[in-house]
């Protein structure tokens, strides 16, 4: 059997379509994070609210004020995430498909995720160092709840 140019092109087309379907499947699988899909207890509230609910009256006034300030600062980041999701949705629905616009929208979303991650890590480091060992233990237990049916171990 000889490999004609047509067969090679057909194989490349099949590989390309397969890769596109794989990426689309990954996006659909993550879609619940962008919309009102199933969420675990860690996704129900902001980190600030979760800490406040978990540690309640044991928090100092200084930490409570920092939690509220963090919530306010994260509001702009959440708005940017929503705007990026809408941009990605619009690009995906646009015909013909514009790969460059899609990649640009994904890069923009990654920048927002990176900013959110950096802000949250900085905030958590600042808060956690002010907690007592008992408060940290209680926080770890609250963060450790898993989604029902999830098997990571």
Image: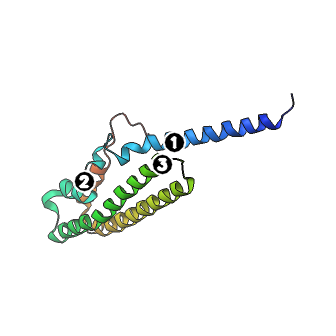
The residue closer to the viewer here, 40 or 22, is 22
Q: Check the image and name the residue furthest to the top.
A: 1
Quadrant of the image occupied by residue 67:
bottom left
- Residue closest to the eye, 122 or 130: 122
- Quick one: SS at disc 2? helix
Percent across and percent down for residue 119 are 36, 67
Q: Earlier in the sequence, mark 1 or mark 2?
A: 1
Residue at 25%, 52% (x, y): give it.
45
Number of other residues with Cα within 10 Å of mark 1, as a class: few under 14, some 14 to 19, many 20 or more: few
The label shown at residue 94 is 3
Above/below status of 16 relative to 104: above
Image depth: mark 1 or mark 3 in front: 3
Report x, y in % for residue 99: 56, 53
In the rendered structure, the answer to whether residue 38 lies left or right of residue 65 reads: right
Disc 2 crowd rating (10 Å Cα; few below 14, some 14-19, many 20+) is some
Foreground residue, 19 or 88? Answer: 88
Q: Are the residues flagged by discs 1 and 2 in contact, CB closer than 8 Å? A: no
Mark 1 and mark 3 lie on one chain; the one further toward the N terminus is 1
**Point 40% across, 44% down: residue:** 31
Q: Which residue is mark 1?
A: 24
Left or right: 19 as drawn, with respect to 144: right
Q: Nearer the viewer, mark 1 or mark 2?
A: 1
Quarter occupied by residue 116: bottom left
């Amino acid at each position: 059997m000889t490999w004609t140019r047509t067969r090679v092109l057909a194989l490349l087309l099949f590989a390309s379509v397969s890769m596109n379907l794989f990426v689309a499947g990954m996006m659909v699988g993550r879609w619940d994070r962008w919309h009102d899909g199933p969420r675990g207890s860690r996704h129900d509230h902001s980190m600030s609210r979760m800490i406040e609910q978990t540690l309640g009256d044991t928090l100092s006034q200084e930490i409570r004020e920092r939690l509220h300030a963090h919530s306010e600062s994260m509001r702009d980041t959440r708005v940017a995430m929503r705007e990026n999701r809408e941009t990605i949705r619009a690009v995906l629905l646009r015909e013909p498909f514009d790969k460059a616009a899609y990649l640009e929208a994904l890069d923009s979303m990654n920048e927002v995720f990176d900013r959110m991650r950096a802000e949250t890590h900085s905030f958590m480091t600042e808060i956690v160092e002010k907690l007592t060992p008992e408060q940290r233990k209680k926080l770890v237990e609250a963060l450790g709840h898993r989604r029902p049916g999830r098997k990571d171990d």
